[in-house]
């Protein structure tokens, strides 16, 4: 059996890419909030 790679279609690939982009954005937002907490130190806790 020969596979034609030019016509290969992945069902759900676009949806998976969207979910992955959302996860990356959420991770970036969490990282930014952690950095912000570290930058202001104890001043943020007052």
Image (cartoon, grey):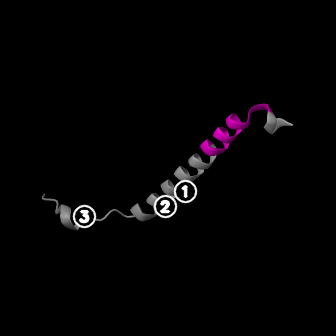
Residue at 57% over, 46% down: 27
Above or below for 3 versus 43: below
The answer to whether residue 17 is left or right of residue 30 is: left
**How far apart are the two marked residues, 3 and 2, measured between alpha carbons?**
20 Å
Helix, strand or loop at mark 2: helix
Which residue, as the protein is rendered here, is positioned at the far left?
2
Pointer 1 local density, CA inside 10 Å: few below 14, some 14–19, many at least 20:
few
Residue at 49% over, 54% down: 20
Comparing 27 with 6, the one in front is 27
Q: Residue 14, percent across and down? A: 42, 64
Q: Residue 13, percent across and down? A: 39, 61
Give the number of the disc on residue 5: none
The answer to whether residue 32 is left or right of residue 7 is: right
Mark 2–mark 1 CB contact (< 8 Å): yes
The answer to whether residue 39 is left or right of residue 10 is: right
Residue at 87% over, 37% down: 46
Q: Nearer the viewer, mark 3 or mark 2?
A: 2
Mark 3–mark 2 CB contact (< 8 Å): no
Sequence-wise first label, 3 or 2: 3
**How far apart are the two marked residues, 2 and 1, measured between alpha carbons?**
6 Å
Sequence-wise first label, 1 or 3: 3
Helix, strand or loop at mark 1: helix
Secondary structure mostly seen in magenta is helix
Residue 39 painted magenta: yes
Q: Which residue is mark 1?
A: 22
Q: Residue 18, percent across and down? A: 49, 61
Magenta extent? 31-42
Q: Which residue is mark 3?
A: 8
Give the number of the disc on residue 18: 2
Above or below for 30 versus 9: above
**How far apart are the two marked residues, 1 and 3, measured between alpha carbons?**
26 Å
Comparing 39 with 23, the one in front is 39
């Amino acid at each position: 059996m020969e596979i034609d790679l030019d016509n290969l279609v992945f069902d759900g690939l676009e949806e998976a890419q969207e979910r992955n982009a959302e996860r990356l954005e959420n991770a970036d937002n969490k990282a930014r909030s952690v950095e912000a907490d570290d930058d202001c130190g104890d001043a943020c806790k007052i």
